[in-house]
Amino acid sequence: MSTSDSNTQLATFAAGCFWGVEETFRQLDGVLDTQVGYIGGHKDDPTYQEVCSKGTGHAEAVEVEYDPETISYEALLEVFWNAHDPTQVNRQGPDVGSQYRTAIFVHSPEQEKAAQASKEALDASGKLNAPVATEIAEAETFWRAEDYHQKYLAKRGMSSCAI
């Protein structure tokens, strides 16, 4: 990712299959770049096949580089909550496994505080039929997925995954 501008920040979200999640964030004003990959596991530089085998502990995730003067982290959190079902544990739709878990990987204490407050507000809102299952964890090494996964839907002229 290009992080040459010191005014940009990173946000990392896991919300099921990373193709659709990336496309959702890629469309937002203020998002400068996205990449999909793997985070939260115990193996260095995992492959897609290894992650899908459920043996590495990684989540499929999207790393978002954004301009906080154009879009706030709180606005990104709102998009995240609306882009998937945060009450499902280790699945989204037909995709089942811990690699499809819902998670926010925070890059700073400020992001952690905002993510926690946002999660608590969603839980208290009564909008959901079950408690929010989203994990909030410190961002570890983000392993970029193979090139064919990057901007997968955009390369195919699609705006969302067909389920």
Image (tube, helix red, strand yellow):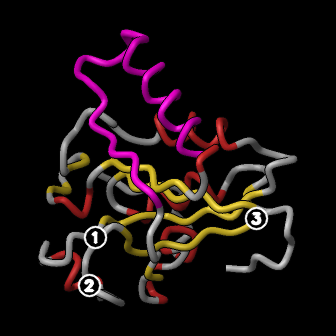
**In this view, 39 is above or below 103:** below
Q: Is residue 157 left or right of residue 61?
A: right
- How far apart marks 2 and 1 lie (CA) works out to 8 Å
Amino acid type of the residue tagged 1 in the rendering: His
Picture quadrant where residue 34 is located:
bottom right
Q: Is residue 36 left or right of residue 108?
A: left
> Looking at the image, which residue is at 83% across and 79% down?
4
- Asked whether the residues under the numbered discs 2 and 1 touch, taking CB atoms below 8 Å apart as contact, a structural biologist would say yes
Q: Quadrant of the N terminus?
A: bottom right
Helix, strand or loop status at disc 1: loop
Please, what secondary structure does the residue beneath circle 3 have?
A: strand
Residue that label 3 marks: 32
Rendering quarter of residue 38: bottom left
Question: In the image, what residue occupies the spot 79% across and 63% down?
Answer: 8
Using residue 89 as the reference point, say whether residue 71 is left or right of it: right
Tell me which numbered mark, 2 or 1, is placed earlier along the sequence: 2
The span shown in magenta is 111-138
Residue with the mark numbered 1:
58
What's the CA distance linking mark 3 and mark 2? 29 Å
Q: Secondary structure at mark 2?
A: loop
Q: Residues within 10 Å of mark 1 (few under 14, many from 20)?
A: many
Residue designated by label 2: 43
Please tell me which residue lies in front, 143 or 153: 143
Name the image quarter holding residue 141. bottom left
Front of the two marks 2 and 1: 2
Disc 1, disc 3: CB below 8 Å?
no
Q: Amino acid at mark 2?
A: Lys
> Callout 3 environment at 10 Å: few (<14), some (14 to 19), or many (20+)?
some
Spatial CA span between label 1 and label 3: 25 Å
